Image (cartoon, grey):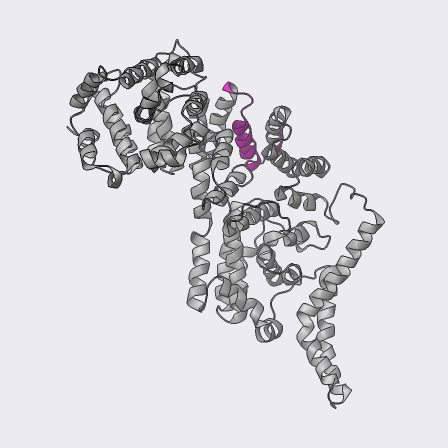
């Protein structure tokens, strides 16, 4: 019987299929009830995984054939070989050590084994390493310290190019992941008095992690259920179960699971952060703050702990305490932009409860000068056509009384600029309020550091923006490669239904089954030239700072902005645009609870969309517009609450 027949599947290099078949087989061949059947299943699984990692296209036909022979015959052949070669004697000692679970997890036992003379025998070096690697691929469950000891002995990370050439990319990646600990789970929870089949349990735990990273929730549940039947007090397994419940949107069970984990590991950062995040979602801000304080007591500089405690105090409307934590967070982490929207929020000129930081006269003067220059630049951007025509006509014999008519649109634009920056916003009816609401939701999409606020306060006009300044709007569609009304509608619907969030979730799902330390190690192990590096880096920053909807805000903001542009350029009718914008706004309201939550998701999503891992620039990707909206004393957000009925108002 071949390995594939034992597993009950066709030959494949898909690890997901192999792991599913193994999990299914465990229901039939339980180690306690049918140890021989379990042994055959386990050996078939190990052989199949090895073949999959090597890749069928790279495996010599003879090797592929030998790996699929009857398992019992392979085992006998191996036993005969162990009596012929010094390397086999060493591997036999490795097998004996690995077979004793509590001996194998002690570093000193491996230190003693790795001091044997054969380790330093250059003649046997390559053969010994290859045999050892073959064994480890089938028996990988060792603590991180032992993997690192093996690397210190054989220098696998240092010689990974040579290793990849000799063993293949899959095997090399397997070794790297274990040496750096990117998928590490602990062994401290196991006690000698336990009656536990460790190999089966560790395989199920690893399978649960694998299936969660693949977002295969059905298979993950199956592996979790089987693992919990064997052992219930493993903090790593509880972490995986908590992530599973989060994915299933069962917050109550997720809270219970993370509380169980916290009872075992009282200082576990992930458990504390997930509980804080879940309590904030349930508007239980005091409980969330308590969990953050517990974390910050042990790790006072923890960036996510600081972020969530700020969010908790803002939820309690305690802006004074929130501001103290914001100031501390910015001092400790000046490179992290996500604290600044909250700073703008609590220092809003109209609603602040805390005193503004005192500014030196030179700083104030500089700010005033920048403001004046900004007003002038905005006016020129909006009125340059009229001004150019006015100056040109002054050079002609045309009477000034006719030329003076061009002063009307110039003065009109000057008045609008002054009004947008100095006077309260006048809203007459719900129709105007709804239009302003849509403009606020899409403010971060405006690609102009001077016009962001202006084009949020005012809508695009027919004469200035469609006839005279059409290029500004057409460049938006050009950026999205949209050339027709049909393509515009298709793109907007794609943003509403799928958008960027699906790709973001793909990377997030690879990370959140891992512990915080493992996630960080994994990111650090990647080369910055790796195409996935910026995506994983940014997804890691969103694990605790974003809601479960992730970066959907950037999709829905752009859907609204494209509708605004399309409507003004005639690609969409007014009713078509309003219907699509209302849908995007409604999705945003259902997925985020506040303006700042929405804008933070938009900002991180904008970096993710650009593949920009330099997540430390405050003015990039619309953040300056967000500062203005959250902190401005005449901000339109003061007139429009996050939760409102405007998305249902189509009149």
Does the magenta portion include 367? no
Name which residue lies at 27% across and 18% down: 88
Rendering coords of residue 381 (x, y %) = 67, 68
The answer to whether residue 168 is seen in the rendering is no
Does the magenta portion include 269? yes
Q: Seen in the image, is 139 located left or right of residue 41?
A: right
Taking the view exactly as shown, the residue that stands out farthest to the front is 123
Q: Seen in the image, is 86 located left or right of residue 306?
A: left
Name which residue lies at 77% across and 61% down: 372
Rendering coords of residue 454 (x, y %) = 66, 62
Q: Quadrant of residue 231?
A: top left
Q: Is residue 426 above or below residue 333?
A: below
Rendering coords of residue 571 (x, y %) = 48, 69
Name the main secondary structure of what is drawn in magenta.
helix
**What range of the chain is rendered magenta?**
264-286
Q: Is residue 400 above or below residue 468?
A: below
Q: Is residue 206 above or below residue 527?
A: above
Rendering coords of residue 478 (x, y %) = 49, 65
Name which residue lies at 50% across and 45% down: 534
């Amino acid at each position: 019987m071949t390995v594939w027949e034992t597993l009950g599947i066709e030959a494949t290099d898909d690890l997901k299929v192999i792991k599913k078949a193994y999990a299914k087989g465990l229901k039939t061949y339980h180690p306690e009830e049918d140890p021989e059947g379990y042994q055959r299943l386990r050996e078939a699984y190990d052989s199949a995984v090895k073949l999959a990692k090597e890749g069928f296209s790279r495996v010599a036909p003879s090797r592929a054939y030998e790996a699929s022979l009857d398992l019992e015959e392979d085992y006998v052949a191996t036993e005969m070989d162990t009596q012929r070669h010094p390397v086999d004697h060493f591997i036999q000692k490795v097998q004996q050590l690995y077979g004793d679970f509590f001996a194998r997890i002690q570093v000193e036992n491996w230190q003693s084994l790795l001091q044997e003379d054969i380790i330093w025998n250059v003649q046997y070096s390559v053969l010994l390493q290859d045999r050892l690697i073959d064994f480890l691929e089938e028996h990988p469950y060792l603590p991180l310290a032992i993997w690192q000891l093996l690397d210190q002995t054989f220098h696998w990370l240092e010689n990974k190019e040579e290793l990849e050439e000799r063993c293949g990319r899959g095997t090399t990646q397997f070794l790297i992941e274990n040496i750096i600990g990117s998928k590490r789970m602990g062994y401290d929870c196991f006690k000698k008095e336990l009656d536990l089949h460790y190999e089966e349990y560790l395989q199920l735990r690893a399978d649960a992690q694998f299936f969660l990273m693949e977002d295969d929730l059905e298979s993950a549940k199956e592996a979790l259920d089987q693992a919990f039947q064997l052992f219930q007090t493993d903090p790593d397994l509880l972490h995986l179960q908590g992530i599973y419940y989060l994915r299933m949107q069962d917050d109550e069970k997720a809270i219970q699971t993370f509380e169980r984990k916290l009872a075992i590991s009282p200082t576990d950062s992930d458990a504390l952060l997930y509980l804080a995040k879940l309590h904030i979602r349930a508007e239980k801000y005091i409980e969330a703050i308590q969990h953050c304080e517990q974390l910050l007591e042990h790790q006072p500089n923890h960036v996510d702990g600081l972020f969530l405690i700020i969010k908790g105090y803002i939820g309690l409307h305690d802006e004074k305490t929130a501001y103290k934590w914001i100031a501390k967070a910015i001092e400790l982490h000046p490179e992290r932009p996500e604290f600044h929207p909250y700073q703008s929020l609590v220092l809003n000129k109209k609603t602040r409860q805390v005193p503004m930081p005192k500014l030196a006269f030179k700083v104030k003067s500089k700010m005033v000068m920048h403001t004046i220059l900004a007003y002038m630049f905005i006016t020129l951007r909006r009125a340059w056509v009229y001004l150019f025509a006015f100056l040109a006509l002054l050079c002609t014999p045309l009477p000034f009384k006719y030329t003076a008519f061009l002063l009307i649109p110039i003065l009109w634009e000057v008045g609008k600029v002054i009004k947008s920056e100095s006077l309260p916003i006048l809203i007459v009816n719900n129709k105007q309020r709804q239009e302003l609401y849509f403009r606020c939701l899409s403010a971060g999409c405006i690609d102009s550091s001077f016009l962001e606020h202006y084009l949020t306060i005012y809508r695009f006009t027919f004469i200035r923006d469609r006839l005279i300044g059409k290029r500004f709007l057409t460049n938006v569609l050009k950026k999205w490669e949209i050339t027709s009304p049909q393509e515009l509608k298709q793109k907007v619907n794609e943003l509403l239904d799928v958008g960027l969030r699906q790709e973001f979730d793909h990377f997030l799902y690879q990370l959140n089954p891992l512990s915080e330390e493992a996630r960080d190690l994994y990111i650090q192990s990647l080369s910055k030239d790796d195409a996935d590096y910026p995506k994983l880096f940014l997804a890691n920053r969103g694990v605790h700072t974003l809601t479960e909807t992730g970066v959907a805000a950037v999709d829905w903001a752009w859907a609204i902005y494209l509708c605004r542009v399309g409507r003004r350029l005639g690609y969409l009718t007014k009713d078509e645009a309003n219907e699509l914008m209302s849908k995007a706004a409604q999705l945003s309201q259902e997925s985020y609870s506040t303006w700042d939550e929405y804008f933070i998701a938009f900002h991180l999503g904008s970096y993710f969309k650009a593949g920009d891992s330099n997540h430390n620039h405050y003015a990039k990707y619309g953040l300056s517009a967000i500062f203005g909206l959250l902190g401005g004393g005449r901000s339109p957000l003061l007139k429009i609450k996050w939760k409102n009925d405007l998305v249902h108002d189509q009149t």
